Each structure stands twice: as C-alpha cells, then as structure tokens.
Amino acid sequence: MNDKKRPARQRDGDGIARWAAQHAAAPEPLPDRAPRRDDNGRPRSYHAPFSALLRRWGGTLLHHLLPGACALCGGDSDDALCPGCAAQFFGPAAAIARCQVCANPLNGHALPARHPTDAERPSPPATRPEEAAGVALLCGVCQAHLPAFDRTLVAADYAMPVDQLVLQLKFGHRLALAPLCARLLRDSVLSQPDFTLPALLCPVPLGPRRLAERGYNQALEIARPLASSLGIALHAQLAVRLRETAAQSSVAPDRRQQNIAGAFAVPDAALVAGRHIGVVDDVMTSGRTLNELAATLKRHGAARVSNLVFARTPPH
Ligand SMILES: [Zn+2]
Ligand SMILES: [Zn+2]
C-alpha cells in the first residue's frame, strides 16, 4: 500500500516505531528527533504504558488483575506483593508464637514440651524465653492428644486480607498466585532454624471429581514451586484419595472425622518408608484432613510428617 493512502494514524504509528528505535539507539536524542509536543507544549507521550491507562480507567478490580499491582492492596508494585503488605502480613514482623505441632497461635497458654533446665533459661529473659532455650512449645490441645503429624509450618493466618489469595487461587482460577503462596511459605519454612527439611513433598490429593470440577489441585500448584525453591523432590501421587469426601468446611464439626476417615491411600509404600514427608496444602482448618493423611503415611512407614501449609485458620 502506498504510504500516502494509509490512514494518518497508521502512518503516525510507523513514525513512532521508527522514532522509538532511533531514540533507543542514541542516548542523546538529536534535536530533529526529539519528541514532538502537543498543542499545550507538553511532550507528546509515545510510550504511555497500556497498563497505566487501563488502571486509570478500569477501577480497583481491574487494577488487582494487572501485572505490576500488589496482589493484596492493588497498589503499584514491581513484586507480587508491595513491601508494605509483605511486611504487614508476612515475614518477621508479622510472625507470632505458634504451637510447633499444629501451628495454632499460642496466646500465652502454651506448655513446653519439656521443661528447660535453669542452665537453658536465658538471662536476662528474651522476648520468648522458651524459644531462646530451644524448647518446643505445644498448645494445650496437642499436649492432651498429639496428632499424627509432627510439625506444622504456615506462612500466615487464614484471615482478611490474606484469605483472598487462597480464595482467588482456589475459586478464581488465579493460578499465578500459587508461586507467590509458595514463596511466602518457603520464607516461613526457612525462617525456622531448627526445622529439618523433609525428604519428599506430597500435596494433599483431591478426588477425581473435585479435580475435574476445578481443573487443578491448588495444593499441587503450591507444592511444585515450593519443592523446586527448597530443592526437595515432589511426588504428586505419593498419596491418593480413595473416595470423594465432602469439603470439611461443609460438614458439621462432629461429623468431620467420619467424613475423612480412610479417605487416603499410599500406592507405593517404598517411597514413604523411613522418610520425612512434607505434606503441602493451601489451608489448614481443623487439621483433621492433615491428621488423616499423616496417619496414613505413618501406617506406610513414614518416619516423620511435617505439614507445610500456606494459611492456618485461627481457632474461634
Ligand atoms: Zn500491597
Ligand atoms: Zn497444637
């Protein structure tokens, strides 16, 4: 097509591309190649970011879906979380004392798993003397009845606004949030100096019907990047679900154990025997599902089971 017959906008577009290429090649733009100015004398913007325009027009919802926005507050961020949200909801400043076995907040009602000797007691007392003395703290529930799993590490409480990450991942098909959840969980795991990494990671399996409905297992989506960032092997089928179970959240508390009992199987016990298995999930609520899975893994010879869970529902 002859250039003169083209629409003016298209000719301008070609000019912009040419100018951009020349401008990029020459650090000091030559006067005749300087950006043209509009009627008000302002430099005409050739490179107005499309996302910036969309943000201005699209409102908060769209803002949250754009790259370059914090997944929690929607503010401008080069990272998936802006520094403010990362510090407020995750990391050392947000860390609270948790039961080492079930990860529930201790709220000052913890019992040490063993009593520290006087020599172990720090002097002067640290903020959390039991931690400084390396004593495992268990909540009253775990003291009364130890679950089948040995340890639970979480990145955060399952509460506003962190729960939105899980809800969007699980029900909003925002799979891009899985690596973020994995990174935050990895940071939490690595912040526990006394924690020995598992030999193998195992996502909590979904039943075939639930998997078909959702199209993916969010636990596996978190487990994949978690395994690679921790340098741990992952076995997606280490445990399988033998039968569909109703979502624990939809079952009355007194029926939850019955709902989940016998739900899991381990097809290849040789993979499990004598090993420390890390079970990965998105949310831990009552812990019954994780307890059932840990019990199943231990029946097949697992030496130790640790839960690596993105978010923990605080007790009511
Ligand atoms: Zn933010
Ligand atoms: Zn506990």
Image (spheres, helix red, strand yellow):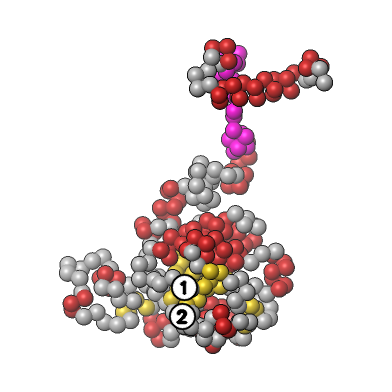
Q: Position of residue 125 (x, y in %)?
A: 20, 68
Q: Using the image as rendered, state which of residue 1 and residue 251 is in the foreground.
A: 1
The answer to the question of whether label 2 and label 1 lie on touching residues, with beta carbons closer than 8 A, is: yes
Gap in angstroms between the C-alphas marked 2 and 1: 8 Å
Q: Position of residue 244 (x, y in %)?
A: 68, 78
Q: Position of residue 298 (x, y in %)?
A: 51, 85
Q: Is residue 299 magenta?
A: no
Q: What residue is pinned by disc 2?
A: 304
Report the amino acid beneath label 1: Pro
- 264 displayed left or right of 99: right
Q: Position of residue 50 (x, y in %)?
A: 62, 34
Q: What residue is pinned by disc 1?
A: 198
Residue displayed at 46% across by 80% down:
304
Chain part drawn in magenta: 35-55
Q: Is residue 38 magenta?
A: yes
Report the amino acid beneath label 2: Arg
- Quadrant location, the N terminus: top right
